[in-house]
């Protein structure tokens, strides 16, 4: 606040000019306000932070509580005070004023006090509402965070299970592929070759695709084909699978289809 604003404030509060000038000079010495030169337009408008600041200025200027309460109420209505401050400040302002035992407060003073108390109560209710809303928002955010953490953990477990299943199937396919190569090599050595029509090697009886796919022994052809398709989808490189695993699964799938077509 500068000297012009302080002087305008005191005049608006009804303080005589000579007292206002003395008070402004004192505030300037005490560094409560600052001096601005005559260069440029003067700033005489003022906005106080709260009723506490207004009451402290009026008390320091020697304005009585009976007059000061009216001024504070008027400044609140005019928007020159941003918010209502501590209610104890108002009570202290009134209690420290020297009043004759035979003089009672006027109805206007009582009304001003009641109005200020109502404003304070409204402010308190608003603050409580904001605090409750804040606590509710925090609780909701915590619940959402916990839910997302659980979902993330569940997805990780599913991915780990799929990867484990893929590794298991890949290992089994490698073993089967080695077995087929061994059988082919033995047949080649013995000179037992079949006509071109039937050169496809039929899987031996112990080559149980149902067991490899985790199906029951009574599973039908449709279930076995569906199991192969699901495994092909999981191991496909476009789905993040291994190209080698996909190759072996595809070979077994083609072998099984050939066996049921024959």
Image: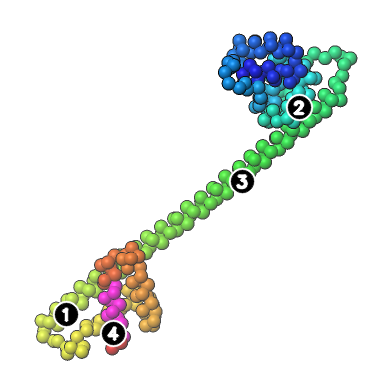
Q: Are marks 3 and 1 in contact (CB under 8 Å)?
A: no
Q: Give the vertical position of 134 relative to 48 (above or below).
A: below
Q: Position of residue 146 (x, y in %)?
A: 51, 51
Q: Give the vertical position of 256 relative to 153 (above or below).
A: below
Most frequent secondary structure within the magenta stretch? helix
Cα distance, mark 3 to mark 1?
72 Å
Residue linked to disc 1: 184
Residue under the image location 69 percent in, 11 percent down: 21
Residue linked to disc 4: 259
Residue linked to disc 2: 74
Q: Position of residue 255 (x, y in %)?
A: 27, 80
Q: Are marks 2 and 4 in contact (CB under 8 Å)?
A: no
Cα distance, mark 3 to mark 2?
37 Å
Cα distance, mark 3 to mark 4?
65 Å
**Region of the chain picked out in magenta, as a range:** 249-260
Q: Nearer the viewer, mark 2 or mark 1?
A: 2
Specify few, some or many for label 1: CA neighbours under 10 Å numbering under 14, 14-19, or 20 or more.
some
Cα distance, mark 4 to mark 1?
17 Å
The single residue placed furthest to the right in the displayed view is 102
Q: Which of the two discs, 2 and 1, labels the residue nearer the N terminus?
A: 2
Secondary-structure class at tag 1: helix
Looking at the rendering, in which quadrant would you find the C terminus? bottom left
Residue linked to disc 3: 136
């Amino acid at each position: 606040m500068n000297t012009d604003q302080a002087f305008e404030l005191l005049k608006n509060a009804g303080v005589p000019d000579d007292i206002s000038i003395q008070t402004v000079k004192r505030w300037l010495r005490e560094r409560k306000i600052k001096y601005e030169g005559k260069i440029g337009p003067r700033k005489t408008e003022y906005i106080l932070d709260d009723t506490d600041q207004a009451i402290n200025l009026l008390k320091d200027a020697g304005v009585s509580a009976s007059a000061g309460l009216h001024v504070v109420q008027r400044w609140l209505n005019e928007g020159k005070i941003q918010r209502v401050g501590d209610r104890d400040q108002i009570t202290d302002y009134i209690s420290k004023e020297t009043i004759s035992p035979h003089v009672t407060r006027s109805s206007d003073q009582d009304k001003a006090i009641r109005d200020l108390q109502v404003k304070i109560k409204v402010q308190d209710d608003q603050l409580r509402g904001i605090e409750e809303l804040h606590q509710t928002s925090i609780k909701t955010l915590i619940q959402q965070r916990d839910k997302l953490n659980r979902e993330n953990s569940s997805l990780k477990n599913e991915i780990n299970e799929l990867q484990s299943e893929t590794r298991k199937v890949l290992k089994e396919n490698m073993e089967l592929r080695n077995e087929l190569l061994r059988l082919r090599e033995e047949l080649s050595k013995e000179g037992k070759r079949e006509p071109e029509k039937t050169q496809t090697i039929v899987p031996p009886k112990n080559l149980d695709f149902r067991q490899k796919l985790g199906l029951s022994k009574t599973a039908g052809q449709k279930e076995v084909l569906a199991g192969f398709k699901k495994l092909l989808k999981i191991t496909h490189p476009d789905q993040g699978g291994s190209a080698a695993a996909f190759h072996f699964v595809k070979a077994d799938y083609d072998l099984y289809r050939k066996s049921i077509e024959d």
